[in-house]
Amino acid sequence: MSQLVDRRLSGKNRSAVNRQRFLRRFKGQIRKAVTEAVSGRKIGDLERGEKISIPSKDLSEPIFHHGPGGRRDMIHPGNKEFVSGDQVDRPEGGAGGGGGQASQDGEGEDDFAFELSKEEFMDFFFQDLALPDLVKKQLAAVPEVKRARAGFVSQGNPSNLHVVRSMKQAIGRRLAMASGPREALKEAQEALADLEDRGLGTSPEADELREEIERLKARVAAVPFIDTWDLRYANRVDQPTPSSQAVMFCLMDVSGSMDEDRKNIAKRFFMLLYLFLTKSYERIEVVFIRHHTVAVEVDEEDFFHSRESGGTVVSSALELMRQIVLERYPSQAWNIYAAQASDGDNWEDDSPRCREILSQGILPLVQYFAYVEIEAEEPQSLWHEYERVAAGSARFAMQRILTLADIYPVFRELFRKKVGA
Amino acid sequence: MEETLTPPSVTRQPLSESSEWTFELLDLYDREIGRVAAHYGLDTYPNQIEVITSEQMIDAYASVGMPVGYHHWSYGKHFLSTQKSYKRGQMGLAYEIVINSSPCIAYLMEENTLTMQALVIAHAAYGHNSFFKGNYLFRTWTDAEGILDYLVFARNFIAECEQRYGEEAVEDLLDSCHALMNHGVDRYKRPAKLSMAKEQMRQVEREEYLQSQVNLLWRTLPPREAAEQGRREDRFPPEPQENLLYFIEKNAPRLAPWQREIVRIVRKIAQYFYPQRQTQVMNEGWATFWHYTLLNHLYQEVKLTDGFMMEFLQSHTNVVFQPPFHSRMYSGINPYALGFAMFSDIRRMCEHPTEEDRQWFPEIAGSDWVKTLDFAMRNFKDESFIAQYLSPRLIRDFKLFAVLDDDQREKLEITAIHDEAGYRRVRQLLADHYNLGNREPNIQVWNVDVYGDRSLTLRHFMHNRRPLGESTPEMLRHIARLWGYTVKMESADENGDAQLVGVCEV
């Protein structure tokens, strides 16, 4: 006879290893696809999986097979009007007709698409950025937690033993366990008293009752004062604690010299800062300011994708940011972070002004200000002025970026602070 | 067990009304189906029916139903693609996943209705199972008792190699072996049976022996003149060999013992699945015929409700649908459709033969259908089964026609259709279509330059002038990885004139 086995709970994720092997083998293609996916995403939208497709010919498993040509006999079903000896044209590259090849060629060309989980996606995202492992772990993990009380449980750590609760429990148990014998005891005592009243204190029944009373007294006395199952422990659970709200300013130079590649690096830079912030704050607003000679606040789409030409006046963006902070984000209610990306160009006379605004107008208001110069040739006046700012403030970080791996050092200070906190 | 003894007329009451399954109901249905199967004389291995989740089912698909498998990226890939089409609703996961083992393991997916579970039990646990136990190919080529142990041995061995020699090294080797899987079978020789205990015992012994053999082959250098002569006259191997993996396992000069063992594992597994590939139409047809017959029998005993039958028939009809060649859904002949139609047709010829049947199949017409079907199941493979049993009536029903595609002619020619003049040709060509030897290029080990650069020459024997496909250079790279020296490929036409079609230098 057949044997029925319920296998549903065992052997889950049996192919997890094979999946890892698959991802490892095609990491080159997958990383490329991830890079593309990242450029299509919004800054705040990094922490989810992604549908990835890679060309299926890259992952074919070859076998020997026949190529086109030669002489082939084929059998097909569903004849309608053919009779023996008919000559028919070869079907054009595909569907049905006499061409049996069609069925094989029809599909193969599609891309092979599959879903990366959130973790896998983040992993590929981080790979280029050369993040230290500890940081990766912190970023990928759930936000910081706080231990919160959550009632009482019957098992726990001795240090969490809750004495009052445990004693209450013991009282209840003692009452419950002793009540039966106590009642019987009371009845026996009454019966004995009744017998003694009637002068039968020495009768065998009275002796029996006395024995019974002793036995019941012993039983009551045997109920332990406190027992292991009375113990109650204070329960604590992890509650995520995003502390409060933050606003992140993204400042970017969009003058003609910022090409798509540079913008893409800048985007990674902004994304990484955003990720750091999501770990600490419950609510994050993002303000995008782009500038050439004048600065404007724009939405994300315009920020990354529109292009302007003309000169560069960085102070315009700093001014605008300061203005927005003062109007909308009072620094006592908001944690303010700013990230600025540029190729280093600035109008010569403007740079000292930038330093001034930054060190006097902005740094006192913000938590952190990070500046990156992307693929700049020689440090120019702006860089030198900013170096002076950096020397005077721990809230300011700057970095010249050639590859994606250069981004992380900008955040090193920021991150260290967070670990320490 | 009482049900089996009670005559059906007494318990004229459905087994259940609801479409939700429970373990008790599965057990009841299984017993009922088993009773009817026994009534028709189906002989099966013991069944182990496992209830699994859809994820586990996809997993089973990805590993071709092997309950234990070694790790390889390609299984991950198949998992992902199966998962994708399942999520899109392009395919149901219900049939097919059952391999020839004892006990025979069949999978039921938890989210299916009771009807589907009963269908799968009938299809896999009684249909396929009896086919595995009865068909001569499975009986001679595979060992149902030993396969599970062997798979465990294979997985452990490969995992151990990964630890010792690195995952990448093992993966590269497996890639190359997998590429040659179709050329790793003995088509005519009978293989030894597999078993884990024997394998383990013999493995060490074999390693040493093999290595010494290989070295011997390469060490014995005859004197120079003899070598020059030998160059022209002797070939090694003296006869061409069709089993490329076997040849590589035994003779590749540069493989380490553990690599030879892995080649052998892949070869053994390929050999194990070879009968499956040769009996697709028969196996699926047989299983489909029996789920249809068994459940209809139960319905006639009024053990199944009308609702059950509606759902069952809907599913059954989808499975045996054959789109015509001009349909968008057409992708060749559906083995379920052809196999089911053929077995049903044999039964029809037994029970209600026509004049035509008497003429074409005098020994079948009017015979006992259960015995005739049983004989057909036991003694044929797809190719011979079609050549033997495809009736004119079915050729008409399917409206089969033959097309000749000759690259030397401008147009395709319809060479035969479903009429009196065409039946035999259509039948022969369809049978040829299921001859694996015709479907896959015939490639043999032709020569090894033993005295020279040790290059390996393979020869492709062309059939009807059909050339090799575009994968050949990549395949040669895989073979060269195993062989360790240059690999050449020649194509020989029907006159025996060979032309070099590819070289992979190492």
Image (spheres, coloured by chain):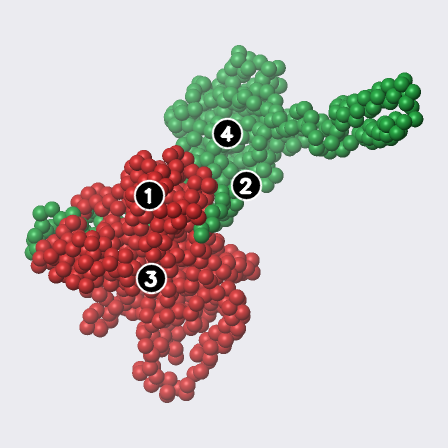
Chain colours: A green, B red
Q: Nearer the viewer, residue A14 or A322?
A: A14
Whether label 2 touches label 3, CB < 8 Å: no
Residue B407 showing in the rendered view: no
Q: Where A174 sits versus B32, above or below?
A: above
- Chain letter behind tag 3: B
Whether label 4 touches label 2, CB < 8 Å: no
Residue identifier under label 4: A270
What separation in Å lies between label 2 and label 3 (alpha carbons)?
59 Å
Q: Position of residue B9 (x, y in %)?
A: 33, 43
- Chain letter behind tag 1: B
Quadrant showing the C terminus of chain A: top right
Q: Residues within 10 Å of mark 3 (few under 14, many from 20)?
A: many
Q: Position of residue B234 (x, y in %)?
A: 33, 82
Residue identifier under label 3: B135
Q: Which residue does the image show at 52% across and 66% down from the upper left?
A: B197
Q: Residues within 10 Å of mark 2 (few under 14, many from 20)?
A: some
* Discs 1/2, front: 1
Mark 4: secondary structure: helix
Dot 4 or dot 2, earlier in sequence: 2
Q: Which residue does the image show at 42% across and 33% down from the upper left?
A: A39
What separation in Å lies between label 1 and label 2 (alpha carbons)?
77 Å
Whether label 4 touches label 3, CB < 8 Å: no
